[in-house]
Amino acid sequence: MASISTLFSADGLLAKAISGFVPRKAQTDMADAVKDALDNNHCLVVEAGTGTGKTFAYLGPALQISGKAIISTGTKNLQEQLYHRDLPVIKKAMGSHRKTALLKGRANYLCIHRMAQHGGNSTLVEKDVLHQLSTVKIWANTTKSGDIGELKTLPEDAKVIPLVTSTVDNCLGRDCPDYEECYLVKARRKALDADVIVVNHHLFFADMALKDTGFGELIPEADAIIFDEAHQIPDIASDYFGESLSTRQIHDMAKDITLLFRTVLKDAGQLDKAADKCRMIASDLRLLFPDSPQRGNWQEALQRDEVREQVSRLADALGVLHEVSRLHIGRDKDLDNLYERIVEARERLDALRDDKQDGVSLWYETTPRHIVLHLTPLSIAAKFRRFVSSPPRGWVFTSATLMVNGGFEHFQRRMGLEDAKTLGLESPFDYQNQALLCVPRYLPEPNSFKMRETLFETAKTLIKASRGRCFLLFTSHAMLNEIAGRLETAVENPLLVQGTTTKQALLSEYLANENAVLLGTGAFWEGVDVRGSDLVCVMIDKLPFASPDDPLLQARIEDVKKRGANPFAAIQIPQAVITLKQGAGRLIRDPTDKGVLVICDNRLVTKPYAQTFISSLPDMRRTRSLEQVEAFLAKID
């Protein structure tokens, strides 16, 4: 078996397979550390700066072990890139015959049973959805994988998708008449049979929390588990270790019962009525909250008489539905499954009505039509620590953004990984020559009304100086929309604004149009890779502190205060540093890139914590003068 040095050296296997491959000490150091963790079943946390080549640094060792490796990444796009682009290259270079598999969450696979259910009964389906349904049926005749992602003509949020895919709730599992033909089952079998499986974080934690039974056999089998984009894990894991219930789930349940009543159980009118009552009460609960979507403290909401009474009505109506559905058990497989869903909804609602619990946050979020109730643990460290410690296997957590103030304490404390080995690797890029960091002079206070004018003028200056080719990143949708609206009449450049179409479509359009400007919030702060002179300037409106009225954050702050620590230093600063590092990381993506990062927040100069932010960013030349920025941009070809 090839050693790490024969894989990554100047005349090694990768150099022979990839033209222009240059050995990087940081990449070899990381690969050595990963191999050590996998060989000796210990835990490793690695920050690898942009350009380190971390993907190959963990794929090489993962392909060398004799057991099974699971690689989990942040999004479906990164998953596809890893599986279709990176894995084949390194496998070929190593001459490896290890079997690989890509596994997505169940919402990505066609459910033959659900599609057939909606086949003959078009009265339950809206007109525009009927057209999408016929598109799906034509494709279903030819697909090998059943991966809905193959249907490029459907929008990402097509209304037909929930009708032709399954959820943990409505899947019949082994009782399904189409079980042997099921695309999800086939994908899982392939994954169980593979040596290296590529999943994403949501799928990993859905399985780990055993919410998704029938897939619980994959993780126990693995000898090595590697997380890329590991900075996302604490928040994703917290969601899966909690409970949630949405009025949409109750609507879907009622809709499925109506479908059964109209097709299979035509004598079960009482059941249909009981389901409809649950649906109406759930809708009325949503009406007790403002129209515009928001997040709030559920514990506080339960203090309102009308909310408490409505929740009580919902609990009673679910109780009646439970009794009525029990009378029909054994008549139909779909109904037996619905009975279990009703039992689970009742249990979750009971947990979410108990406002006297310690160590958890009860919060809610509303969408235009629904409300989702959440119970989230304030810390997952103890639970995750137990999970990592047995059975013994190698664990690797890596990202370009894990360190705060030169250390890993923040990430280790949140994940219960205090005993892990750590490794920080700087980017090989020459930031002093490649990049400029500017905090402009004379900035108003971040939340003052004058700031809007300053941002608008600064954006105009930067767009002109960079001839488009820039990202304007915002911490709020309100500011994004305001600046986008004002720029429309002020600049000639095409403006691509987040929310007008999908993220991928916006990126494709940006790359196709050499003087375009992209304006985005959260989604564009990470996972976006634009190289060369297509992106020479990134403007960030202010330090990305999480919204102080976020109920989950408030609960964590209270918890830290109770323990006598400073929540601003323990939670808010580290999270903002990691988000800022992600945003800044969009700028320089390869050794020849050049560009300017402009952060319009005077707290980077005036506040004592500014040093924590500055020292966590790459070592760029610094200026406070926009004239210097214009001169730097003028020299970029």
Image: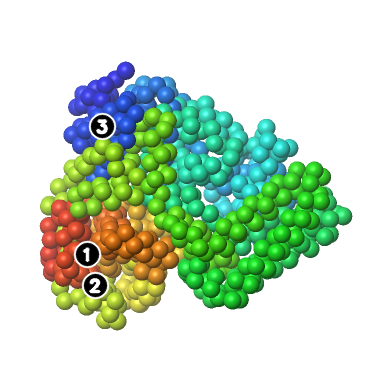
Residue at 16 percent across and 76 percent down: it is 442
Residue 152 image point, x, y percent: 54, 49
| Amino acid type of the residue that numbered disc 1 sits on in the rendered structure | Val
Q: Is residue 324 left or right of residue 391?
A: right
According to the picture, the residue beneath numbered tag 3 turns out to be 33
| Tag count | 3
Query: Is residue 393 something that shows in the picture?
Result: yes
Q: Earlier in the sequence, mark 3 or mark 2?
A: 3
Q: Earlier in the sequence, mark 1 or mark 2?
A: 2
Residue that mark 2 sits on: 458
The answer to whether residue 530 is above or below residue 605 is above
Q: Nearer the viewer, residue 506 or 289?
A: 289
Q: Nearer the viewer, mark 3 or mark 1?
A: 3
Residue at the spot 39% in from the left edge and 58% down from the top edge? 523
State how far apart marks 1 and 2 are (Cα): 9 Å
Q: Please, is residue 8 above or below residue 312 in the view?
A: above
Q: Nearer the viewer, mark 3 or mark 2?
A: 3
**Residue behind mark 1:** 598
**Residue 475 rendering spot, x and y as whole percentages:** 34, 66
User: Label 2 amino acid?
Assistant: Thr
Residue type at mark 3?
A: Ala
Residue sitting at 23 percent across and 52 percent down? 404
For the residue labelled by badge 1, is the local secondary structure a helix, a strand or a loop? Answer: strand
